C-alpha cells in the first residue's frame, strides 16, 4: 500500500481545521480573555486566562471552565446559578454584578473581561470576600412589631395598597452589590456608622408594613446613619432584582426622619410640652 504523501496529509489537516472553524462559527464559539484577580488578604494582581466561549455563556460559566482547565485553585463563590442566591457577586469590568447573570455577549468582545472581588468588604482569597459584617448589622434593626389583631377571629384587616407597597422590598436576595457600590461604605469606610442601602431597604420593609407599630426614626438617624446617604441612586442601578432602592425605600425613610426630628413645628410642640409644669 502506498503511504499518503505529506501534501495530501497537509490538505486533510487544513480541510479538517477549516471545517472545525466553520462549525465553531456556526454555533458561536470564540476565544475570550479573562483578567481575573488572584491573591489573598488584600494582596494580589490580575492574571489573564484565555478560554473558549459559546453563545449563551455567562461570566460564571467561563470561570468554571477556567477552573476546570487552567486554574483549579481559583476561589469563587456561587450556589444557584439562577440569580437568586446572591452568592456570586463580583466586579465585572469595574461594575458590581452577579457573575451568573452577566452574559458574555453583553460585554465588549474586543477587550479582556476583568473580574475582581467586591471592594467594600475584606478580601479573603481570589474573588471571595468576607461579607459577614452585613449579618452583624441586621439584628441591630428593631424587629417587626405587629399591632394587636383587629378582627374577632384574631386576624388583621389591611388595605391591599399597603400590602403591595412593601412587596418590592421582599425581592432582595442579599447579594450586597448595593452595599459594594455605596460610596459611604466603599470610599469612606463608614461601616461602624452606616448600615448601607440593603438594610435601609430592610428597615423600610418594616417601617412601611401595614401591621408594624415600631418607630425606627430615631434609630435610623442616630445609630444607622441615614443622613450619610446623599441619594446618588448608584445602589438602585446595580440591584439585580430591580428594586427601586433610593426612591421607594431610602427617600421615604429620610422623610420620616425629617418629619420626626427636623420639623420646626414639631420641635416647637416638644419644647412647649417640655416647659409645662406638672399639676
Image: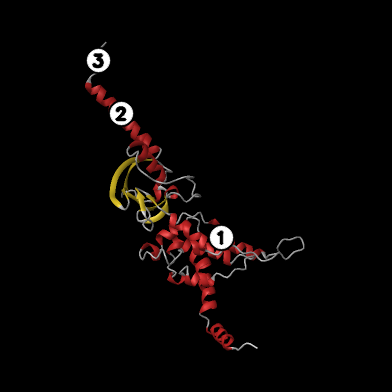
Instruction: State the image coordinates of residue 193 (x, y, percent, origin top left).
Output: 43, 67
Q: Residue at x 31, y 32 (%)?
A: 18
Q: Which residue is mark 1?
A: 168
- The Cα atoms of the two marked residues, 1 and 3, are separated by 73 Å
Question: Which residue occupies the foreground of this view, 71 or 261?
Answer: 261
Whichever of callouts 3 and 2 sits on the residue coming sooner in the sequence is 3
> Which label is found at residue 15?
2
Q: Mark 2 packing: few (<14 Cα in 10 Å), some, or many (20+)?
A: few
Q: Which secondary structure, mark 1?
A: helix
- Is 235 placed left or right of 202 in the picture? left
Whichever of callouts 1 and 3 sits on the residue coming sooner in the sequence is 3
* Image colouring: secondary structure
Q: Residue at x 46, y 54 (%)?
A: 175
Question: Which residue occupies the foreground of this view, 111 or 87?
Answer: 87
- The Cα atoms of the two marked residues, 1 and 2, are separated by 57 Å
Looking at the rendering, which quadrant does residue 234 occupy? bottom left
| For discs 1 and 3, the disc positioned in front in the rendered view | 1
Q: Residue at x 52, y 64 (%)?
A: 141
Q: Mark 1 packing: few (<14 Cα in 10 Å), some, or many (20+)?
A: some
Q: Is residue 275 visible?
A: yes
Q: Which residue is mark 3?
A: 3
Toward the top, the furthest residue is 1
Amino acid at each position: 500500500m502506498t503511504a499518503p504523501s505529506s501534501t495530501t496529509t497537509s490538505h486533510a489537516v487544513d480541510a479538517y481545521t477549516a471545517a472545525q472553524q466553520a462549525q465553531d462559527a456556526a454555533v458561536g464559539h470564540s476565544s475570550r480573555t479573562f483578567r481575573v484577580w488572584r491573591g489573598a488578604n488584600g494582596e494580589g494582581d490580575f492574571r489573564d486566562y484565555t478560554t473558549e466561549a459559546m453563545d449563551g455563556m455567562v461570566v460564571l460559566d467561563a470561570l468554571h471552565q477556567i477552573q476546570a482547565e487552567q486554574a483549579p485553585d481559583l476561589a469563587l463563590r456561587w450556589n444557584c446559578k439562577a440569580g437568586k442566591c446572591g452568592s456570586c457577586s463580583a466586579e465585572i469590568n469595574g461594575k458590581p454584578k452577579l457573575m451568573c447573570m452577566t452574559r458574555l455577549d453583553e460585554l465588549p468582545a474586543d477587550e479582556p473581561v476583568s473580574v475582581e472581588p467586591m471592594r467594600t468588604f475584606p478580601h479573603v482569597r481570589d474573588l471571595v470576600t468576607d461579607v459577614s459584617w452585613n449579618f452583624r448589622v441586621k439584628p441591630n434593626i428593631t424587629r417587626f412589631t405587629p399591632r394587636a389583631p383587629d378582627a374577632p377571629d384574631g386576624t388583621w384587616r389591611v388595605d391591599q395598597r399597603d400590602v403591595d407597597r412593601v412587596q418590592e422590598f421582599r425581592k432582595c436576595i442579599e447579594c450586597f452589590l448595593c452595599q459594594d457600590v455605596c460610596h459611604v461604605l466603599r470610599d469612606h469606610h463608614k461601616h461602624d456608622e452606616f448600615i448601607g442601602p440593603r438594610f435601609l431597604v430592610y428597615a423600610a420593609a418594616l417601617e412601611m408594613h401595614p401591621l408594624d407599630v415600631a418607630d425606627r426614626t430615631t434609630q435610623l438617624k442616630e445609630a444607622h446613619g441615614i443622613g450619610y446617604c446623599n441619594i446618588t441612586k448608584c445602589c438602585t442601578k446595580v440591584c439585580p432584582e430591580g428594586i427601586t432602592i433610593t426612591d421607594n425605600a431610602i427617600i421615604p425613610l429620610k422623610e420620616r426622619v425629617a418629619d420626626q426630628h427636623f420639623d420646626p413645628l414639631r420641635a416647637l410642640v416638644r419644647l412647649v410640652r417640655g416647659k409645662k409644669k406638672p399639676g
